[in-house]
Amino acid sequence: MKHLGGKFGDAVCDVLGIKTMAELEHFTEKELQAKFDEKNGTWLYNIARGVDPEPVRARFNPKSIGCCKQFKGKAALIDLHSLEKWLRDLADEVEGRLEQDALESNRTPRQMVVSFAVQAAGRDASSSRSYNFSPVDDLRGSTFASKALELVLEGAEGSKPKDDENNRRLKAPIKFLGISVGKFEDNNETKKTKRINDFFAAGASKETIRLSNENTIKVRRKNSEDKNYVLE
């Protein structure tokens, strides 16, 4: 309950000897005013009965939708497999949130940003890279994860990958990962219907695809032979 989660809420529980809103309803307005002054007593009396005078504020759509994860100490990511795994998890979470946003707000993101922090030379170095979606990109977790992997590998200093190594170690441990999408544009009704259908189709087949490909995931990169990566 808003305004009752801090010290004031603790004081109400201690002074009145209660734990639930249902118990608060047993007190009269005068009793509450005597214990918590006139203003707070009246507010407690009303809120216990579902009356809140605070005006309703319009809900504004967020400028971006994303999620992130910290990897402290020994939990830092040190190899390619762990990096891929966590990027997939974050990307799937973004897809779920984006699906809900598409249903509620009728809009589509035009850009993805991946943020990361590596531990190098005794200090943490943070960076971020962006990718602008093309009209043919499927806005789903698999796309977010693959593009994010490319951005992380291309955006951090490292060495050329070796084809004969199955699970290459990262040159520097990764302590933070984040994926977000933004720069939204409103959809017309045709785009809205198509996008919602795409989301539901992706959700229905996601688990089947993941199970069948769980042990055969490959990292796909275009024109990466001459690029330097964070891998050694």
Image (tube, rainbow, N blue to C red):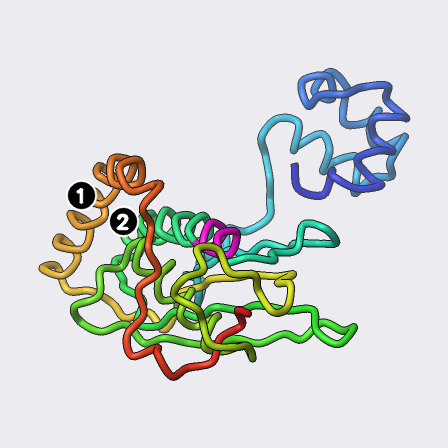
Q: Nearer the viewer, residue 198 or 186?
A: 198
Which residue range is magenta in the image? 81-87
Camera-near label (2 vs 1) is 1
Label 1 sits on a secondary structure element that is helix
Q: Nearer the viewer, residue 60 or 140?
A: 140
Badge 2: residue crowd in 10 Å (few <14, some 14–19, many ≥20): some
User: Pointer 2: what residue?
Assistant: 103
Residue 68 visible here? yes
Badge 1: residue crowd in 10 Å (few <14, some 14–19, many ≥20): few
For the view shown, which residue lies furthest in the bottom direction? 226
> Which numbered tag is attached to residue 106?
none
Q: Residue at point 84% right, 33% down? A: 10
Q: Position of residue 79 (x, y in %)?
A: 55, 57
For the view shown, which residue lies furthest in the left direction? 190
Q: Residue at point 45% right, 63% down? A: 180
> Which numbered tag is attached to residue 201?
1
